[in-house]
Image: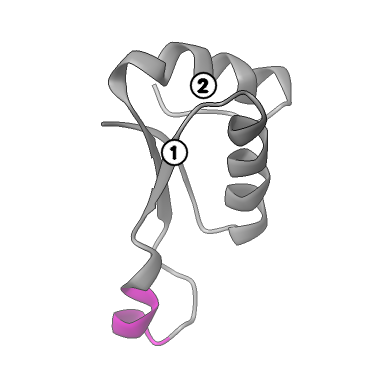
Amino acid sequence: MKELLRTNDPTLIAFAQALLGGEDIACFEFDVHTSVLEGSIGILPRRLMVRTQDHFRASAVLRDNDISVER
């Protein structure tokens, strides 16, 4: 798996997941349950991961919708 997006904004993660789902690109959100450790204040970013072979296409989908992706 390869990191596609890292953000503290849960709405951005949800939007990115919807875009990728519309293109049949499987993605998985990492660090969702770290809120238990941090006290739910949102300082630790969440990561959106995709399969390595889908990374290029997923990056293009997000960039086309003005979402910057990790390099």
User: In the orientation shown, which residue stands out farthest toward the right?
Assistant: 65
The spot of residue 42 in percent (x, y) is: 49, 72
- In this view, 36 is above or below 43: below
The chief SS type of the magenta part is helix
The spot of residue 53 in percent (x, y) is: 33, 14
**Residue linked to disc 1:** 27
The C terminus - image quarter:
top left
- In this view, 16 is above or below 1: below
Front-most of residues 63 and 43: 63
Hey, what amino acid is under mark 2?
Answer: Ala
The spot of residue 19 in percent (x, y) is: 67, 33
- Residue displayed at 59% across by 31% down: 20
- In this view, 50 is above or below 59: below
- Residue displayed at 44% across by 38% down: 27
**Residue linked to disc 2:** 58
Q: Is residue 31 magenta?
A: no
- In this view, 50 is above or below 34: above
Q: Which residues are magenta?
A: 34-39
Asked if the residues shown at circle 2 and circle 1 are in contact, with their CB atoms under 8 angstroms apart, the answer is yes
User: In the orientation shown, which residue stands out farthest toward the bottom?
Assistant: 39
